[in-house]
Amino acid sequence: MGVPETYDIDEQDLSKKYKDLQKFLHPDKFTNRDKKEHEISEEYSSLVNEAYKTLLEPLARGIYMLQLQGHDILENTEEDQVFLMEIMEKNEEVENAETEEEIMILNQENKKIIKDLQQKLSKAFFNGDLESVIKLLSKMKYYTSIDSQIQAVIRNKGIIR
């Protein structure tokens, strides 16, 4: 994609590079070309789309960067029990939220936690502290899942903000 290999990504720069690549690679540009060229443009356009989605989303970007360094997040059944209890409680809070105010407070709190995790991840990547990166990404997975649940509740309740 032509962007620096860093966790802190300039989303505007990424978006511009994505659009520039798609202007060149999009299959619509190859409709009058032979079948092979059209297939190649479809393949590369798809790869650019996938790369863009991965780099744009903080959790996916972190996992990708970790994989570039030869590591994965393992499903750790020995997670900190206190942390797992917190996650279970957060899930229950989301499930039990009935008012718009309750869900929006949970949304704000969760977004703040994710932003804090992103800042810590940035520092851990910068310092080459892969042990911390793995732990932080593992936590981010849980909070990103909670965010998805919150966004589903917001949509289902028709909350517009």
Image (cartoon, rainbow, N blue to C red):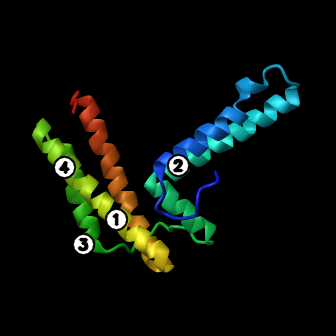
Q: Label for residue 106?
A: 4
Q: Which residue is mark 3?
A: 82
- Say which amino acid is labelled 1: Leu
Q: Is residue 49 above or below residue 81?
A: above
Mark 2 secondary-structure assignment: helix
Q: Which residue is mark 1?
A: 117
Q: Label for residue 13?
A: 2
Q: Nearer the viewer, residue 9 or 158?
A: 9
Distance, label 1 to label 4, CA atoms, is: 17 Å
Question: Mark 2 or 1 closer to N-term?
Answer: 2
Q: Residue drawn at (26%, 30%), measured in percent from left and top? A: 156
- Say which amino acid is labelled 3: Val
Q: Residues within 10 Å of mark 2 (few under 14, many from 20)?
A: few
Looking at the image, is mark 2 or mark 1 nearer the viewer? 2
Distance, label 2 to label 1, CA atoms, is: 23 Å
Q: Residue drawn at (28%, 31%), measured in percent from left and top? A: 155
Give how far across and how far down residue 132 sits, in percent: 42, 77
Q: Is residue 133 above or below residue 39?
A: below
Looking at the image, is mark 1 or mark 4 nearer the viewer? 1
Mark 4 secondary-structure assignment: helix
Distance, label 3 to label 4, CA atoms, is: 19 Å
Give how far across and how far down residue 13 sits, in percent: 52, 49
Question: Mark 3 or 1 closer to N-term?
Answer: 3
Question: Mark 1 or 4 closer to N-term?
Answer: 4
Q: Is residue 118 left or right of residue 5?
A: left
